Image (cartoon, rainbow, N blue to C red):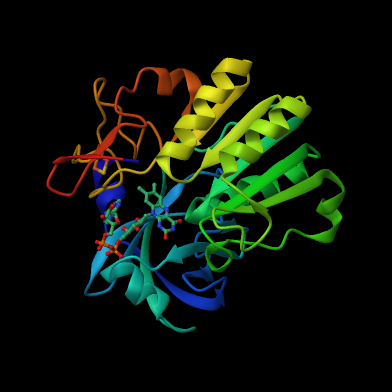
Amino acid sequence: MNTRELLGNPVSVKIVDIVQENSRDWTLYFKNNQPSLEVTPGQFLMVWVPSVDEIPMGICHFNKETMGFTVRRVGEATKVLSTLDVDDWIGIRGPFGTGYDLHGDSVLVVGGGIGMAPLRLLTNQLLRGRREVDLIIGGREASELLLYEFGSASKRNLEIHICTDDGSRGIKGLATEVATRLITEQQFDSIYSCGPEMMMHEMFQLSRKKGIKFQASLERYMKCGCGICGTCSMDPNGALVCQDGPVFSGEELEKIEEFGKYHRDEMGIKRKF
Ligand SMILES: Cc1cc2nc3c(=O)[nH]c(=O)nc-3n(C[C@H](O)[C@H](O)[C@H](O)COP(=O)(O)OP(=O)(O)OC[C@H]3O[C@@H](n4cnc5c(N)ncnc54)[C@H](O)[C@@H]3O)c2cc1C
Ligand code: FES
């Protein structure tokens, strides 16, 4: 795509369905107006919220007819998105960025909080490929868990492990603690993660220790979403989260010094995790 195509006007799409997932998260489904569009799990959209802002959202659902993302209400734009109705319009650009590279027969997927959103599309694709999937869904408390439905046909090769920090649902403890136990008991070819950066950093170290292929989806402040403004660049190699990521392999993460340490806010000021 050239600059004009990347930064051009967003495509207007009409919301066709909304599902409230829990107390903080809503999944918005809209018509896929571009039948030739291809999406790799892990890619994201720049979502234009009319009169408010344009913000990045991971794609959690995609087929020839419809697409969707799950929004967690944290500030102005996400609040407006969470209060939209069926038949309202939003704008989308994308999909942008890298997706997860599907690898291995026995895989561990680790999602924390809203990080479960892009992992839904990934998990569905892994299951369609008949891989054995252990999925850890973590959250601070029960009301924040993103518990998507996976079709009953998939359940044969899917094992879901739910955990909460406060023990209000599932295992009491962190997703990384559950992952540590599973990795000790089972053999995995690949680990995929998305969620709080400290969680992903711990998973990265664990995978390194055990020699398991690792991929994680990072979040950084984004403006253009497509490699032009430089806002999302990381130290020291200038890797752009919107273009070289958001999904990075373990080998790529080795070279990113700020991973698990700090990010930059909208003013470019360093903020520790
Ligand atoms: C690749 C990627 C995928 C994402 N996927 C999802 C998703 O599937 N669901 C979801 O709920 N959220 C997702 N986010 C985070 C989401 O973009 C922010 O929560 C949102 O932009 C907040 O906007 P706001 O106006 O509601 O809040 P604000 O009050 O403006 O910001 C709240 C916090 O959100 C972050 N943020 C704000 N603006 C941006 C921006 N333009 N780019 C990145 N971070 C920002 C900052 O850390 C800020 O402190 C994703 C972010 C990235 C980078
Ligand atoms: S957001 Fe502009 S270069 Fe990444």
Quadrant location, ligand no. 2: top left
Most foreground residue, 31 or 109? 109
Asked if residue 27 lies left or right of residue 254, the reply is right
Asked if residue 59 lies left or right of residue 226, the reply is right
Asked if residue 233 lies left or right of residue 171, the reply is left
Q: Is residue 10 above or below residue 130?
A: below
The quadrant in which residue 190 appears is top right
Asked if residue 74 lies left or right of residue 114, the reply is left
Residue 91 locus on image (x, y percent): 35, 67
Q: Is residue 56 visible?
A: yes
**The C terminus: image quadrant:** top left
Residue 83 locus on image (x, y percent): 40, 81
Q: Is residue 38 visible?
A: no
Which residue corresponds to the image point at 60% horizontal and 22% vertical from the top-left? Answer: 213
Most foreground residue, 86 or 137? 137
Q: How many marks?
A: 0
Which residue corresponds to the image point at 41% horizontal and 18% vertical from the top-left? Answer: 254
Most foreground residue, 91 or 140? 140
Which residue corresponds to the image point at 27% horizontal and 61% vertical from the top-left? Answer: 54
Which residue corresponds to the image point at 58% horizontal and 61% vertical from the top-left? Answer: 146
Q: Is residue 183 above or below residue 125?
A: above
Residue 232 locus on image (x, y percent): 26, 39
Most foreground residue, 83 or 227? 83
Residue 182 locus on image (x, y percent): 72, 33
The quadrant in which residue 157 appears is top right
**The N terminus: image quadrant:** top left
